């Protein structure tokens, strides 16, 4: 699962690079609003994915511990 968290972090870094390029280039206000909305959605999705993975990992660890108890 660490690989998946690494991929999420990589996607987040790529999003930051994209935002840096976008902020340096002129754009129409309507395009900026659409991009801002998309960025919020992407960030929330990445956070949700990371939280889901952490939850799955915690549940797996807990169930494994229960299985090992006598």
Image: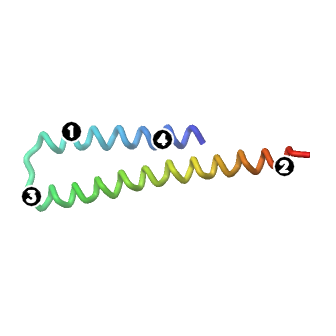
Residue where numbered disc 1 is placed:
20
Residue where numbered disc 3 is placed:
29
State yes or no: discs 1 and 2 in contact (Cβ < 8 Å). Answer: no
- Relative placement, left or right, of 24 versus 13 is left
Q: Residue at x 38, y 55 (%)?
A: 44
Name the outermost residue toward the front: 70
Q: Please, what secondary structure does the residue beneath circle 1 have?
A: helix
In front: 69, or 28?
Answer: 69
Q: Residues within 10 Å of mark 2 (few under 14, many from 20)?
A: few
Q: In the image, residue 35 lies at what x, y percent?
A: 22, 55
Residue where numbered disc 4 is placed:
7
Determine the CA span between mark 1 and mark 2.
49 Å
Earlier-in-chain disc, 4 versus 3? 4
Q: Please, what secondary structure does the residue beneath circle 3 have?
A: helix
Residue where numbered disc 2 is placed:
67
Determine the CA span between mark 4 and mark 1.
20 Å
């Amino acid at each position: 699962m660490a690989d998946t968290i690494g991929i999420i972090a990589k996607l987040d870094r790529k999003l930051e690079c994209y935002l840096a390029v976008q902020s340096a280039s002129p754009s129409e206000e309507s395009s900026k609003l659409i991009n801002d909305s998309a960025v919020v959605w992407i960030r929330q999705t990445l956070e949700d994915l990371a939280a889901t993975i952490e939850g799955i990992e915690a549940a797996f660890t807990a169930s494994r511990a229960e299985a090992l108890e006598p």
